Image (spheres, grey):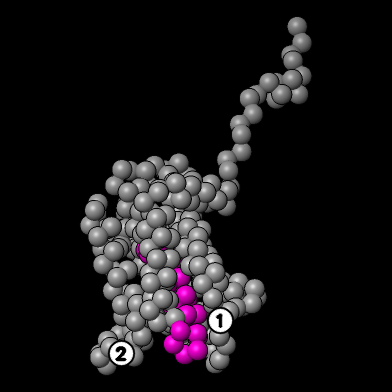
Amino acid sequence: MTAAPATTLTSARPRTAAAPSAALRTVRYALHTTWMTVTNVMFMLFTIAMPVGMYLLFGMMFGEQGGGDARGMIMVNMAAYGGLGAAVTAGTQIQEDQRNGFLRQLVVAGLSPRSFLLGSVMAASAVIAPALIAVGIAGILSGVEVGPVAFLATIAVLWLGLLPTILIGIVLGMVLRGGTAMAGGVITMMAMAIFGGLWMPLETFPDWMQQIGHAIPTYWISRLGIWSLQGGELPVTGLLVIGAWTLVLGVLCALSLRRAVGLKRR
C-alpha cells in the first residue's frame, strides 16, 4: 500500500486566517469608539448646541464691535470652546474602557497600547469636527465675512491645534477613576476656556491670569484660528507652546496607559 502524496497531506491541513495588522486594529477601534461617541445624544448636544448658543449670544452682544471683526473672533473662540469640550470629554471616556476591563481585553486580544492610544486620538479628533463646523456655519449665517479657503483653513487650524487637549482628556481618563474623571474633565475644560480667553479677552484679566493664559494651548489655539481667519503675523510662539504641550502629554499618555494595563517595558 503506497503512502499518500505529500501534497495531499499538506492540502488537508486547515488554513488559519491571517491576524489583522496593527493598523487595521487601530482603525477598527477608532471607528467603533467614534460611533459610540456620536450616538451619545447628550454628548453631541453638549459639544454642539452649547457653543453655537454661546456664539449667538456673544455675537448679538458684541459682534458689531471693531466694524464687525469681533463677530469673527467670537466665532473662532466659540468653535475652539466647542472643540475643547469635545476633545477633553472624548478623552476622559477612556476611563470607562479601563473601569470595565475592556481596555485590558483589547490589549490581550492583540491591540497594542500604542494602537489603543492612536485609535483614541483618532476617535476624539473625529468628534471634534462637528463642533467646529457647526459654530463656523452659524458664524457665516449670522454675517461673518469669510471666503471658503479661509473658512476651511480656520477649521483645519483649530482642529490640529486641539490635539494637546485630546491628550489632556486621555491623561485624566487614565489617572482618575469613575465619575471623578468626567468631573475632572469638566473642571479642566472650564479652566482652560477661561484662562485661554475663549469667553472674554484675556487682556481684561489680571496680569497673573494673562501669564497663565500665555502658557496654555487654548489661548494660542484661538490666536492661530484668528490668524487664519483675518490674517496678520503668524503667532510662532503659539506653535511652540502647542508643540511642547503635545510632546509632554504624549509621553504622559504612554506612561499612564502602560500602567493602566499592567504592562512593563520590554
Look at 50% across and 67% down and name the residue there: 138
Q: Secondary structure at mark 1?
A: helix
Q: Residues within 10 Å of mark 1 (few under 14, many from 20)?
A: many
Asked whether the residues under the numbered discs 1 and 2 touch, taking CB atoms below 8 Å apart as contact, a structural biologist would say: no
> What residue sits right under mark 1 in the picture?
229
Q: Which residues are magenta?
A: 64-88
The one nearer the camera, 124 or 249, is 124
Q: How far apart are the alpha carbons under marks 1 and 2?
A: 23 Å
Question: Does the magenta segment cover residue 84?
Answer: yes
Kind of residue at disc 1: Leu
The one nearer the camera, 239 or 207, is 207
Q: Is residue 133 visible?
A: yes
Kind of residue at disc 2: Thr
For the N terminus, which image quadrant?
Answer: top right
237 horizontally vs 174: left or right: right
For the C terminus, which image quadrant?
Answer: bottom left
Q: Quadrant of residue 217?
A: bottom left
Look at 30% across and 63% down and name the residue there: 185
User: Picture coordinates of residue 85 (x, y %)?
Assistant: 38, 64
From this view, report whether residue 18 is shown above or below residue 188.
Answer: above
> What residue sits right under mark 2 in the picture?
204
Look at 35% across and 77% down and name the residue there: 199
Furthest-top residue in view? 1
Q: Quadrant of residue 148?
A: bottom right
From this view, report whether residue 74 is shown above or below residue 100.
Answer: below
